[in-house]
Image (cartoon, rainbow, N blue to C red):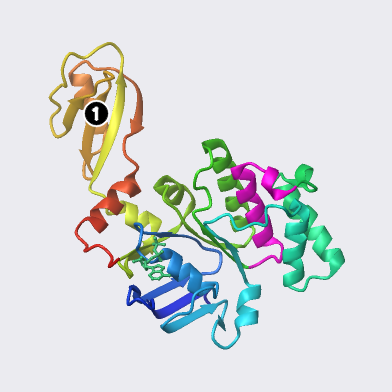
Amino acid sequence: MKALSIKNLTKTYANGNQALKGINIDVEPGDFCALLGPNGAGKTTAIGIISSLVNKTSGSVEIFGHSIDTELEAAKTHLGLVPQEINLNLWEGVANIVRTQAGYYGLPRKLADERTEKYLRELRLWDRRNDAARSLSGGMKRRLMIARALVHEPRLLILDEPTAGVDIEIRRSMWDYLQRINAEGTTIILTTHYLEEAESLCRHVAIIDGGEIIEDAPMSSVLRQLQREVFVLNIDGELREAPTLSGFETSLRDDGDLEVVTSKDRRLNDLFAELDRNDIRVVSLRNKANRLEELFMGLVENKPGPAE
Ligand code: ADP
C-alpha cells in the first residue's frame, strides 16, 4: 500500500485554467518527498485536492489505501496538512488551537490534552500555551501549525512551504524536527522554494511544471544527472589572474576567490593535482550554486509556462 497514490489527476478551474493535466504520483510509506515546481505549476492545487479543499476534475487520490471519493473520513484521519498561508485564529490561545483540532478528529478530552502538551513541548511552544496566537513570531506561528497538523498523529504529513520567511536558525530546527518524525515513521511531503531544503531533507523528488510531472525519481538519481559542479576555492595568498588548469574552467571572483567548474567525469584529485602544479594552495572549498537549483532551472527552462 502506498502512503499516497495519485492517478491521472486533472483539475480545470471554472475559468478554464487547466491547473493539472493528468498527474501520477506514488509516495511510499516512510518516504520524505519534495514536490517542486515554479509558481503556477499546480502544487497548491494538487495539495488542495489531496486535502479535499479543492474538487478535482478527474482522476483518483488514495491516502494509505483510502480513496478521497469513497472513504474521505478515513483518508483524512491519515493526513495532516500545514498550509502555506497562516490560517490560525489569531485571537485564540495557542493550546486551545491545538486542542480544538484534536476535537475535530474525535480525540477524547484526556488524550487531546496529552497530545496538545506533547506537541507544544516538542515544537517549543509550551511556555506560550496560554498566549493568543497573534502574539507569536512568524516562526512560532508556523510551528503552531505543525503542532496542530500532528495532534491526531497522521501517518502522512504534507507541508506547503513550511519554512517560507523563517530565519535560518528556525528553519534548521524545523528540519531537525521533520527528520526526527520521519525517522519515527511519519511519511512527509513538502513543497519548498528553498531547493537546499529539498536537497538536504528529501529522498524522493517530484517536479511539476505547467500541470505535468516532469521528473519523479529518487533525489540521489536526480542529482546524479547533473553534469557540472562549481566550486569556490579560497586561496592562500593572492592571485592576479585566474590560472589555466588543464581540464577545468576557472575564473577569479571579485572577492579574490577562485571559481572552478568541473564536469562529472573529473575527479577532485585531478583538480588538486593541477592546483599543486601551479603552486596554488587552497585554504577552503565550497559548492557555489545549489546543485538542485541548477538542475531545476535546466528542467523548466525549455518548458512552456503555465496558462494564467
Ligand atoms: P503553484 O502552487 O504551483 O504555484 P497553483 O496550483 O496555485 O500553482 O496554480 C496552478 C494554476 O492554476 C495556475 O495557472 C493558477 O493561476 C491556476 N489557479 C489556481 N487557483 C485558481 C482558481 N481558484 N481559479 C482559477 N485558476 C486558478
Image quarter for ligand 1 equals bottom left
- Residue 276 shown in magenta: no
Image quarter for residue 276?
Answer: top left
Residue in the image at 49% along x and 54% along y: 161
The answer to whether residue 153 is magenta is: yes
Q: Where is the N terminus found, in terms of image quarters?
A: bottom right
Choose top left, top right, bottom left or bottom right for residue 211. bottom left
Residue 228 shown left or right of residue 103 in the figure:
left
**Residue at the limit of the structure toward the bottom, as seen here:** 70
Dot 1: what SS?
Answer: strand
Residue underneath mark 1? 259
Which amino acid does the dot numbered 1 rest on? Glu
Q: Nearer the viewer, residue 164 or 239?
A: 164
151 sits left or right of 40 in the view: right
- Counting from the top left corner in percent of width and height, residue 55 is at 48, 79
| Magenta residues (range) | 132-154
In the rendered image of this protein, does residue 222 appear above or below residue 264?
A: below
Query: Can you give x and y, in whole percent of width and height, for residue 12 in the image?
Result: 36, 78
Whole-percent x, y for residue 179 in the image: 57, 51
Query: Callout 1: 10 Å neighbours few (<14), some, many (20+)?
Result: many
Q: Residue at x 55, y 82 (%)?
A: 68
What is the quadrant of the C terminus in the image? bottom left
Q: Residue furthest right?
A: 110
Residue found 18% across the figure and 27% down from its top: 251
197, 277: nearer the viewer: 197
